[in-house]
Image: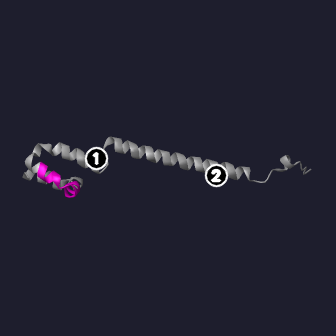
Amino acid sequence: MRQEIMEMIKQNKEWHDYLRKEPSWYRLLSRHPYQIESFERASLQFHKKTFPDRVERLNNGLQMASALFYMMNAQFSQTTSDTPASSEETGENNQ
């Protein structure tokens, strides 16, 4: 493999990790060093750092926050309906 390609890979920990997990890229980059952009895209997909992956993580986080908010509201409304009735509702007079 070309020295400059190897140095680029060593400088980026994620690329280095991906190369160790997918050794076929080592052979491919040795024969076709111009494939470094494809290697970069494959590494981003492997580490789930593409834009669609980030949007999906954001969406999952929002769904979880929404579910927690719904549960909190349901719990709050349940506790307020379980409180004892006030004196006006029971018909007691405290005069």
Asked if the stretch drawn in magenta spans residue 80, the answer is no
The 10 Å Cα crowd at callout 1, few under 14, some 14 to 19, many 20 or more, is some
Tag 2: amino acid: Gln
Residue 26 location in percent, x, y? 14, 53
In front of the other: 2 or 26: 26
Residue for point 16% across, 53% down: 24
C-beta proximity under 8 Å, tags 2 and 1: no
The number of numbered badges drawn on the structure is 2
Q: Which mark is residue 26?
A: none
Tag 1: amino acid: Gln
Mark 1 residue element: helix
**Name of the residue lying farthest toward the front:** 24
Mark 2 residue element: helix
* Residue hosting label 1: 45
Residue 35 appears left or right of 46: left
In front of the other: 32 or 73: 32
User: Is the stretch drawn in magenta largely helix, strand or loop?
Assistant: helix
Residue 66 location in percent, x, y? 53, 45
Give the number of the mark in front: 2 or 1.
Answer: 1
Which of the colour schemes (rainbow, by chain, secondary structure, one colour) is used?
one colour
Residue for point 28% across, 50% down: 46
Residue 91 location in percent, x, y? 89, 48
Residue for point 7% across, 51% down: 2
Residue for point 18% across, 54% down: 11
* Residue hosting label 2: 75
- Label 2 vs 1, first from the N-terminus: 1
The CA distance from mark 2 to mark 1 is: 40 Å
The 10 Å Cα crowd at callout 2, few under 14, some 14 to 19, many 20 or more, is few
Residue 62 appears left or right of 46: right
Magenta stretch bounds: 16-28
Asked if the stretch drawn in magenta spans residue 21, the answer is yes
